[in-house]
Image (tube, grey):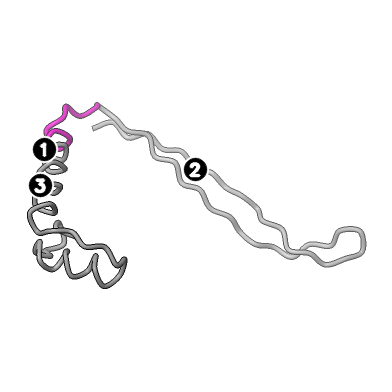
Amino acid sequence: MYSFGMSTRDIQRHLQQVYGVEVSPETISNITESVMIDVREWQNRPLEKSYPILFLDALRVNSCQDGKNINKALYTALHRSHDS
């Protein structure tokens, strides 16, 4: 929520309204700062030369099986590895 521009008070109100949880702005700030340390480490990690990508999809088709019309899924998987 913080990364989307909500202030600590906005987050406090949201948690109260949606979940019925009372959290102080100071606690939210401490949690946010703790998470930001991990985010900064992740952002500054060394990158691999390439990353594989896997696309999964399915196509629904009507089929006749044992004299009955049924829907079946035709699954596809595409793999791509891109070197930078």
Q: Position of residue 32 (x, y in %)?
A: 13, 49
- 3 or 79: nearer the viewer: 3
| Rendering quarter of residue 50 | top left
Q: Are marks 1 and 2 in contact (CB under 8 Å)?
A: no
- 21 or 6: nearer the viewer: 21
Disc 2 target residue? 78
- Identify the amino acid type marked 1: Ile
Relative horizontal placement of residue 11, taking residue 51 as reference (left or right): left
The residue lying at 53 percent from left, 53 percent from top is: 57
> Which of marks 2 and 3 precedes in the sequence?
3
Secondary element at tag 3: helix
The residue lying at 9 percent from left, 45 percent from top is: 33
> Which of marks 3 and 1 precedes in the sequence?
3
Q: Position of residue 77 (x, y in %)?
A: 53, 44
Measure the alpha-carbon separation of dots 3 and 2.
43 Å
Queried whether the magenta region covers residue 44, the answer comes back as: yes
The residue lying at 11 percent from left, 63 percent from top is: 5
For discs 1 and 3, the disc positioned in front in the rendered view: 3
Farthest residue, direction right: 67
| Rendering quarter of residue 70 | bottom right
The residue lying at 37 percent from left, 34 percent from top is: 52
Secondary element at tag 2: strand
Q: Position of residue 75 (x, y in %)?
A: 61, 49
